[in-house]
């Protein structure tokens, strides 16, 4: 590999940021993402100017921590979680969609439904027979609230 690639700090910081973004997809917590942002900001600064390695590390550390502190909660509320648990966007993935009852369901007895190839606990205020199509009216953690399809 050409040694001149390693003499370009903007490329190194860009690749570090890319690696951190990819790690965020694998590891839970939504923290590593902001260190990727810090690496890319550092890459941009290196592209514009020519800071020394000490200044690059300071820029990386400061921008990573500041973006983590200022943006993490806001992004999580917007895209992942709300005060009630799941965001409306995720809730809408279920609400109004069709599933199939795997067991009998009635107001006294919880049952199971198949939705997108996954088995879910289900509750209904109406009688539903196994094999019947149902419409999802809501969701609470791992339980779906369903009604018979008309």
Image: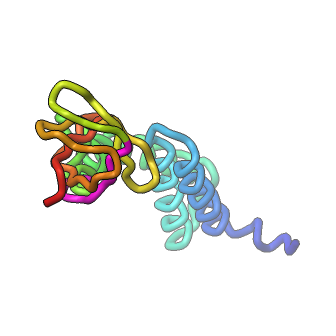
At x 17%, y 40%, the residue is 127
- Taking 49 as reference, is 117 above or below it? above
Instruction: Please state the horizontal and vertical placement of residue 7, each as a whole percent of the image.
Output: 74, 67
Q: Residue at x 26, y 41 (%)?
A: 144
Q: Nearer the viewer, residue 83 or 93?
A: 93
Asked where in the image residue 15 lies, by quadrant, the reply is bottom right
Question: Is 68 in front, or is 108?
Answer: 108
- Residue 86 lies in the magenta-colored region: no
Q: Quadrant of residue 70?
A: top left
The x and y percentages for residue 85 are: 24, 36
User: Which of these two is toward me, 55 or 44?
Assistant: 44
Count numbered badges in the picture. Answer: 0
In the rendered image, the quadrant that contains the C terminus is bottom left
Is residue 102 rendered to the left or right of residue 25?
Answer: left
Looking at the rendering, in which quadrant would you find the N terminus? bottom right
What is the basis of the colouring in this image? rainbow
Which residue appears farthest toward the front when viewing the image? 129
* Farthest-out residue, top: 108
Residue 124 image offset from top left, x and y in percent: 17, 38
Q: Position of residue 9 (x, y in %)?
A: 65, 64
**Residue at 20 percent of width and 54 percent of height:** 135
Q: Tell me the residue at 19%/33% (across/down).
A: 106
Which stretch is magenta? 94-102
């Amino acid at each position: 590999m050409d040694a001149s690639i390693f003499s370009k700090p903007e490329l190194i910081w860009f690749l570090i940021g890319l690696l951190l973004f990819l790690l965020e997809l694998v590891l839970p917590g939504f923290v590593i993402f902001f260190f990727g942002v810090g690496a890319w900001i550092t890459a941009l600064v290196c592209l514009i100017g020519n800071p020394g390695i000490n200044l690059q590390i300071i820029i990386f550390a400061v921008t990573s921590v500041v973006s983590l502190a200022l943006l993490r909660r806001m992004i999580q509320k917007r895209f992942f979680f709300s005060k009630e648990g799941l965001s409306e966007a995720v809730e809408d993935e279920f609400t109004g969609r069709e599933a199939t009852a795997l067991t009998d369901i009635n107001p006294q007895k919880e049952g199971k439904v198949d939705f997108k190839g996954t088995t879910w606990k289900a509750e209904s205020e109406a009688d539903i027979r196994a094999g019947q199509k149902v419409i999802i009216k809501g969701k609470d953690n791992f339980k779906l609230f369903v009604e018979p399809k008309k």
